[in-house]
Amino acid sequence: MVSLLLAIIYLAFISLGLPDSLLGASWPIMHKELSVPLSYAGMLSMIISGGTIISSIFSDALTRKLGTGLVTAISVLLTACALFGFSISNSFVILCILGIPYGLGAGTIDAALNNYVALHYSSRHMSWLHCFWGVGASVSPYIMGYALSSGLGWRNGYGIISVIQIVLTIILFLSLPLWQKRTTSQTGGEASAGPLGLMATLKLQGVITVLLIFFSYCAFESTAGLWISSYLVENRGMAGESAAIFGSLFYLGITIGRFVCGFITNQFGDKAMIRIGSFIMLLGVIFILIPLNTSITALIGIIIIGLGAAPVYPSLIHATPNHFGKENSQAIIGIQMASAYIGTTLMPPLFGLLAEHISIALYPIYLLLFLILMIVFSEKLNKVVAK
């Protein structure tokens, strides 16, 4: 029964990744049909991210009241309905309205599932589960690409993903007894106390520091992924088609890295995996900084960065119950997710402004800044939790 539940959680992580890359894959066609500027993708993305941040903050109270299984099932249903709405929408305003449940569903499931796995499973499964998120995030653009290339259109692309999400929702609702048995058979913080509340959570020793770690890491990762292709074209003279292909190697590096890390993370532990990943990320940034008139060093660097980033996020989440106690982990993971999404939402556009008004050559310097912040705050947290 436990292995069956774990398989369902893996499916849920694929479900979590499916909607995340759809907008970027479909927007070049969507905005033309909707007769809105290309830049409106940023507005829609921020609405989705806003919903995700809000639901992450309140995930503790919801999960304690309803349980992880029911919260997960409802969240996937919410995103499935939003995706179906996208598939029949002819208005950008309607898409913005649908972006609210789109984001609310994503934030709640992210925080609830990550806390459940951190409490009940080893760091190996945390790494592999985040690898499966990458599978979902990688598969959906291919589905959208198939829909566009075969003449089905972007609406049918969203429709196909919504059907997959509906099937996963049914599986999750049918699996609810498994979640309840797993929760009642083990001690943990999921239902042991009332919700902390945001202010009480922020007052816990080390919480502000860990929020800064998540903010810095996600600012680094999202900026690295979003701007690498533009950097290769504008600063290294690579052709746009080639840059798009090589840019995807960053995410491939993360996905492969998380799969490999699953075999070693139990032996090394979360703290060591974060340090190893940080060192490898630093090595990758140094490769990009090498001032040679070639794109080879930058390509090597971005692959190294992806491999280094692989263990950091899963290990940070998995360490949360040990750092702050099982009874506090749901509340803290919720606001960690919120801090992560704030970094993801705000910092890549800020670099876009710097690239436009100063130079895109600042790309590795910008990454280095957030990497140094992440390392400094991570070491600070290690000292706090060791007391």
Image (cartoon, rainbow, N blue to C red):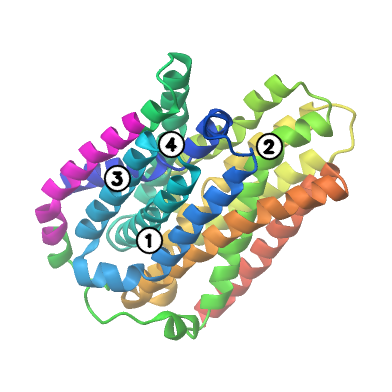
**Circle 3: residue type:** Cys
**N-term-proximal mark, 4 vs 3:** 3
**Circle 1: residue type:** Ala
208 displayed left or right of 10:
right
Q: Distance between the residues labelled 4 and 3?
A: 16 Å
In the rendered view, tell whether residue 135 sits above or below residue 221: above
**N-term-proximal mark, 1 vs 3:** 3
Q: Which of marks 1 and 2 is in front?
A: 1
**N-term-proximal mark, 2 vs 4:** 4
Give the residue at mark 2.
Answer: 302
Total count of labels: 4
Q: Distance between the residues labelled 2 and 4?
A: 38 Å
Instruction: Rate crowding at label 2 as few (under 14), some (14 to 19) or many (20 or more) other CA atoms within 10 Å.
Output: many
**N-term-proximal mark, 1 vs 4:** 4
Q: Which of marks 1 and 3 is in front?
A: 3
Secondary structure beneath label 2? helix
**Circle 2: residue type:** Ile
State the extent of the magenta-drawn residues as a range: 159-181
Please provide percent x and percent y for residue 110.
38, 55
229 displayed left or right of 167:
right
Toward which corner of the image does residue 369 lie, by quadrant? Answer: bottom right
Give the residue at mark 3.
Answer: 81
